[in-house]
Image (cartoon, rainbow, N blue to C red):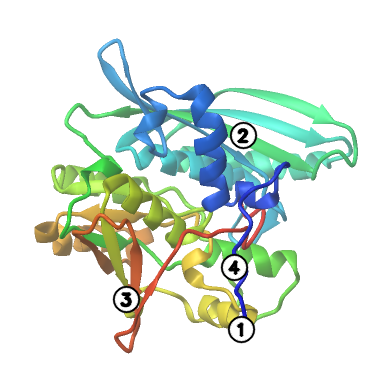
């Protein structure tokens, strides 16, 4: 009899997979961070904390970026940091306003490369309509880091009638993805390993202000939850939402928007696009009756032209994500258990 090994989820030291956005990340948060930090804001389990401050609802978020390589087709660590934090605020239904930036720079890092990164950050911030209002810089000894790491925190304002939360998801809701999946993760992998494919794979890093603003303006009462499927890809994000909402989700494999380049690269390397990171798309959960209108709104934005309805929410407390295959078969899509592509953001 051949026995399949079960992935180890118990470690005495931090592993790369603890930062992968999958099962080990969730276990680290639930077993170590939550017991010490638990409060009503963390328990929202959202991309940003929603806080009431002197009568105003604000969203507050933070993220750190350690991507390798720091320059890649379609962007670099700088605009990745700005766009990632802006999108986290947008996923809370907030209008992004202010960012902080923290640099950890390795001794010997070229000034011209730092200027290139900073210039790109300024351009990304201007495009997203946010101000970088404070920051910090630390320099560490040579060979003690990987050139440069960046932390960005952000504050946004939430409208009084906006209610975006995974807890709002209901059976029958429709799942939309705003663009092609797997672009960023495969771009980083191919650049890092100097892999040459027939067509260059470019990162999808971008802020999605127009898509979110249009959805919340035109369908203010129909958008259940927004989430950007970064680390761990669609699989981890869908599983997080299913668990929070106590539902199951069915995804239609034939409806997934995947470029020929990403699809070919994944097949060649034995990777599943559902587990590959993204940096410029969102998952939108919307009421069934308004799904067609939501799709139309998204496709009217430049970054949403490839949007597709990819699935639906099922009335089941099993909290499982299924994928229906092109031949009618059905498989369970679990949250990633290890680290498929380390340091992609």
Nearer the observer: mark 2 or 3; the answer is 3
Q: Secondary structure at mark 4?
A: helix
Q: Are marks 1 and 2 in contact (CB under 8 Å)?
A: no
**Residue 318 occupies which quadrant of the picture?**
bottom left
- Residue 172 position in % (x across, y down): 15, 60
Indicate which disc residue 151 carries. Answer: 2
In the picture, measured across the screen, residue 301 lies left or right of residue 104, that is left
- Residue 241 position in % (x across, y down): 34, 50
Q: Earlier in the sequence, mark 1 or mark 2?
A: 1
Dot 3 corresponds to which residue? 255
Residue 2 higher or lower than 297, as above or below: below
Residue 123 visible within the image = no
Residue 345 higher or lower than 95, as above or below: below
Q: Secondary structure at mark 3?
A: helix
Residue 325 higher or lower than 44, as above or below: below
Q: CA distance from mark 4 to mark 2?
A: 23 Å
Q: Residue at x 34, y 69 (%)?
A: 322
Dot 1 corresponds to which residue? 1
Q: Secondary structure at mark 1?
A: loop
Q: Are marks 2 and 3 in contact (CB under 8 Å)?
A: no
Q: Residue at x 38, y 38 (%)?
A: 46
């Amino acid at each position: 009899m051949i026995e399949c090994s079960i992935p180890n989820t118990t470690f005495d030291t931090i592993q790369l997979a603890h930062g992968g956005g999958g099962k080990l990340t969730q276990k680290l948060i639930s077993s170590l961070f939550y017991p010490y930090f638990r409060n009503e804001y963390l328990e929202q389990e959202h991309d940003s904390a929603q806080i009431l401050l002197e009568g105003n609802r604000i969203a507050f978020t933070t993220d750190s970026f350690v991507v390798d390589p720091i320059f890649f087709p379609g962007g670099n660590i700088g605009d990745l940091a700005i766009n990632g934090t802006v999108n986290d605020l947008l996923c809370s239904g907030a209008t992004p306003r202010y960012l902080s930036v923290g640099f950890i720079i390795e001794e010997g890092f070229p000034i011209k490369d730092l200027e290139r990164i900073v210039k790109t950050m300024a351009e990304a911030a201007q495009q997203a309509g946010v101000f970088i209002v404070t920051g910090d810089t630390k320099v560490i000894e040579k060979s003690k880091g990987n050139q440069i790491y960046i932390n960005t925190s952000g504050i946004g304002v939430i409208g009084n009638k906006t209610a975006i939360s995974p807890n709002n998801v209901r059976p029958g809701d429709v799942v939309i993805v705003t663009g092609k999946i797997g672009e960023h993760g495969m771009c980083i992998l191919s650049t890092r390993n100097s892999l040459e494919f027939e067509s260059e794979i470019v990162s999808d890093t971008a802020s999605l202000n127009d898509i979110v603003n249009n959805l919340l303006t035109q369908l203010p009462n129909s958008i259940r939850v927004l989430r950007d499927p970064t680390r761990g890809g669609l699989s981890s994000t869908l599983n997080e939402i299913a668990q929070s909402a106590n539902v199951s989700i069915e995804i239609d494999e034939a409806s997934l928007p995947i470029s020929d380049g990403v699809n070919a690269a994944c097949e060649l390397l034995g990777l599943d696009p559902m587990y590959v990171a993204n940096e410029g798309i969102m998952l939108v959960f919307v009421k069934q009756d308004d799904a067609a209108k939501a799709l139309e709104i998204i496709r009217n934005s430049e970054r949403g032209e490839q949007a597709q309805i990819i699935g639906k929410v099922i009335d089941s407390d099993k909290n499982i994500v299924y994928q229906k295959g092109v031949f009618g078969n059905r498989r369970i899509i679990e949250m990633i258990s290890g680290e498929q592509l380390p340091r992609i953001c």
